[in-house]
């Protein structure tokens, strides 16, 4: 019962809301379907991660399956984290500010990944129903097969024709049931929608696009080189073809000798021009290679400088965060010192007030004792010598009227 109450995550969100950590508690739902559970656990993950409580998809799966002891262990971890937060007197805003920006960015990325994993952990209601239906059909197939085997074992004596008909009917029903179960399993597998892996697909698309661009560049380079080579061949082939045709026609006609000095000069000049073109192209390639190396070196230097600047900014952020944390600790210590000083001042004032009361009480008692002594001395002087001395306190208390009566004749005498 305890595990069932905490299987939806609603009560955990209520606990965090009462401690002012779950601000979006109004968006939680008390339903027990897959959509409400997914919503509740996705909203619980950032808060529990901020408290430092381990809340993985395996824990969520155990909570949904109502495994024994999982909810108790999770609640104990939440209790320890909340007690630690209350002792430190930190709010949710303070916890978020004390985290470094790298940790906050990592937490946001892990939250997105956790949401994607949670969709595969929590089964849909349709899948559960289809699985239960398929299990029911499988149980029925097993029962029918068991009944057939039991009948065969008992060996009911019947005519061979009737037994064969029954076997044929049983086989037909078994085939029909298997066909239905296979069809149902095919529908289940077809309805199971695989969750898209966005990160892997994006990486694959990026790598495929990069490969295509490299192939395009290589194809363009090859086509340009082939076009240049074709232009050079076009420049060279017409003259060579005419010379060869002339050289073949001249011996047939007998009009001119085979080796003329003009044709040899043309061929030598064309060979020299071809060699010069090849050398020029080699020089251009070497120059282009040097330029590429320079550009590559320049880009690497720029990347190195940008990386150093980024590292410097990160160090400054870490220093600022450390100083902020130290200032928070100093402020907390100052508040504690002021509180202790106030308590000490109050204790001193209370002690002084009590000492005054004691002193006033002592003075009062001293005055009362002096008054009693004066009265007793006065009575002893006024009582005649023939009378016995009064030592009892009751007698002393009765003496004043007697003293007054004795003092009247003295006053008349005077």
Image (cartoon, rainbow, N blue to C red):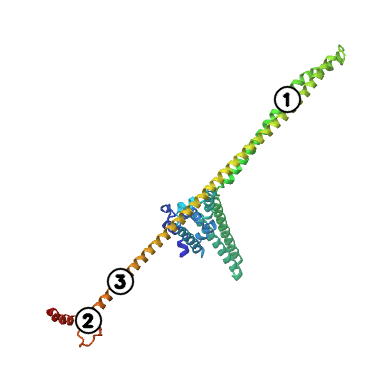
Give the CA distance from mark 1 to mark 2.
156 Å
Q: Tell which of 195 and 42 is nearer to you.
A: 42
> Could you say whether the residue bearing mark 3 is in a helix, strand or loop?
helix
Q: Tell which of 191 and 74 is nearer to you.
A: 74
| Residue underneath mark 3 | 363
Q: Is residue 391 above or below residue 258?
A: below
Within 10 angstroms of label 2, few (less than 14), some, or many (20 or more) residues? few
> Could you say whether the residue bearing mark 2 is in a helix, strand or loop?
helix
Q: In this view, does 32 lie above or below 369?
A: above
Find residue 249 and report its image quarter. Answer: top right
| Residue underneath mark 1 | 230
Residue 161 point in image, percent of width and height: 60, 64
Residue 410 point in image, percent of width and height: 14, 80
Q: Tell which of 111 and 82 is nearer to you.
A: 82
Looking at the image, can residue 221 be seen?
Answer: yes
- Residue located at (33% from left, 67% from top): 356
Number of labels in the image equals: 3
Q: In this view, does 241 lie above or below 411?
A: above
Give the mark nearest the N terminus, 1 or 3. 1
Task: Check whether the beta carbons of the residues at disc 1 and disc 2 lie within 8 A of each other.
Answer: no
> Could you say whether the residue bearing mark 1 is in a helix, strand or loop?
helix
- Residue located at (73% from left, 30% from top): 286
Q: Is residue 408 above or below residue 178?
A: below
| Residue underneath mark 2 | 381
Left or right, residue 56 beside residue 259: left
Looking at the image, can residue 133 be seen?
Answer: no
Find residue 372 and report its image quarter. Answer: bottom left
């Amino acid at each position: 019962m305890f595990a069932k109450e905490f299987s939806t995550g609603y009560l955990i969100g209520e606990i965090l809301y009462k401690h002012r950590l779950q601000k979006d508690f109004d968006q939680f739902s008390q339903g027990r379907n897959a959509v409400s559970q997914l919503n509740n656990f996705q909203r619980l993950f950032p808060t529990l991660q901020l408290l430092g409580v381990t809340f993985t998809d395996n824990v969520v799966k155990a909570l949904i399956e109502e495994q024994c002891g999982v909810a108790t262990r999770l609640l104990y971890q939440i209790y320890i984290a909340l007690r630690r937060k209350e002792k430190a007197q930190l709010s949710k805003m303070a916890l978020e500010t004390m985290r470094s920006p790298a940790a906050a960015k990592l937490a946001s990325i892990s939250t997105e990944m956790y949401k994607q994993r949670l969709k595969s952990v929590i089964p849909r209601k349709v899948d559960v129903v289809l699985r239960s239906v398929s299990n029911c059909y499988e149980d029925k197939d097993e029962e029918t097969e068991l009944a057939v085997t039991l009948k065969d074992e008992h060996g009911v004596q019947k005519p061979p024709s009737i037994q064969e008909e029954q076997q044929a009917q049983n086989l037909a029903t078994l085939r029909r049931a298997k066909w239905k179960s296979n069809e149902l399993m095919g529908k289940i597998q077809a309805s199971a929608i695989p969750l898209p892996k966005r990160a892997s697909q994006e990486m694959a698309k990026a790598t495929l696009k990069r490969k295509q661009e490299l192939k395009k560049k290589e194809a363009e380079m090859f086509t340009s080189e082939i076009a240049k080579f074709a232009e050079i061949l076009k420049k060279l082939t017409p003259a060579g073809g005419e010379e060869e045709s002339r050289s073949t026609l001249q011996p047939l006609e007998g009009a001119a000798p085979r080796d003329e000095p003009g044709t040899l000069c043309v061929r030598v000049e064309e060979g020299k021009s071809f060699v010069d073109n090849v050398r020029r192209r080699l020089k251009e390639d070497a120059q282009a290679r040097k330029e590429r190396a320079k550009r590559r070196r320049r880009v690497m230097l720029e990347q190195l400088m940008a990386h150093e600047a980024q590292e410097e900014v990160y160090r400054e952020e870490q220093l600022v965060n450390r100083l902020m944390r130290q200032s928070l600790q100093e402020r907390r210590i100052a508040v504690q010192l002021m509180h202790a000083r106030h308590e000490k001042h109050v204790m001193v004032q209370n002690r002084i007030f009590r000492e005054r009361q004691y002193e006033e009480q002592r003075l009062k008692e001293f005055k009362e004792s002096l008054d009693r002594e004066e009265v007793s001395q006065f009575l002893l002087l006024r009582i005649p010598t023939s009378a016995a001395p009064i030592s009892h306190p009751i007698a002393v208390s009765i003496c004043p009227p007697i003293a007054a009566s004795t003092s009247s004749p003295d006053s008349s005498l005077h």
